[in-house]
Image (cartoon, helix red, strand yellow):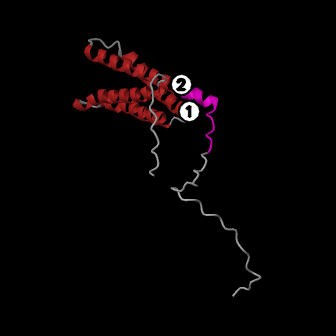
Amino acid sequence: MASQAELKPARVRPVPPALNSPDYQPPERPVAKPTPRWRNGFAHAVPWLLAVMLTTVILQIALGGAMALGEDYEYREVHGMLAGILHLLPLMVILTGVLAKDWPATAAGGAVLLLVGFQYPLIELTGAVRSMHVLNALLIFTITLLTMHERMPWVKRVKPQAKAPKA
């Protein structure tokens, strides 16, 4: 057994007051650092990149319809050229979304990139399965539209309110 000389008193932390006590003081929240100016610039660019991508998707759908309903195939070259541009736009959205720390836009850009890449095997299929090419284009349209709409500056966003502590 240890002798009295070897024992040293330890510092004891006081017990904080209970949450329902009048003496309770909530801990101070750390002040959030302001977003850097360069990151705000990328955040402002994301919805406009999505708008350009949406316009390209609409043109692609219109050109595809013109090719399907028309007798001549003069729209095929323009449709193919826009498909190349449509590969670059989701990459730009991904890069801009990462730099802006906009993770939902980055994920949407990645999803659109995969869906655009999936268009080529779909058009090579035969029969009724080939119609999935059009449905995939509509899915690309929907993802781009919804992602863009959430980020447009004139859209009012409702912030969720924190729940009040129960007394």
In reply to whether residue 50 is colored magenta, the answer given is no
Q: Residue furthest front?
A: 22
Q: Position of residue 47 (x, y in %)?
A: 48, 25
Which residue, given by chain and number where applicable, does mark 2 sit on? 45
Residue range corresponding to the magenta coloring: 30-43
User: How many residues crowd mark 1 within 10 Å: few (<14), some (14–19), many (20+)?
Assistant: many
Name the kind of residue labelled 1 in the image: Ala
Q: Position of residue 140 (x, y in %)?
A: 37, 29
Front one among 51 and 69: 51
Which residue, given by chain and number where applicable, does mark 1 sit on? 100
Residue 98 quadrant:
top right
165 up-or-down from 33: above or below? below
Query: Which circle's residue, 2 or 1, is located before the other in the chain?
Result: 2
- Give the total number of marks visible in the rendering: 2
Name the kind of residue labelled 2 in the image: Ala
Residue at horizontal 63 percent and vertical 32 percent from the top: 36
Provide the secondary structure element on which disc 2 rests: helix
Residue 74 is marked as none
In reply to whether residue 42 is colored magenta, the answer given is yes
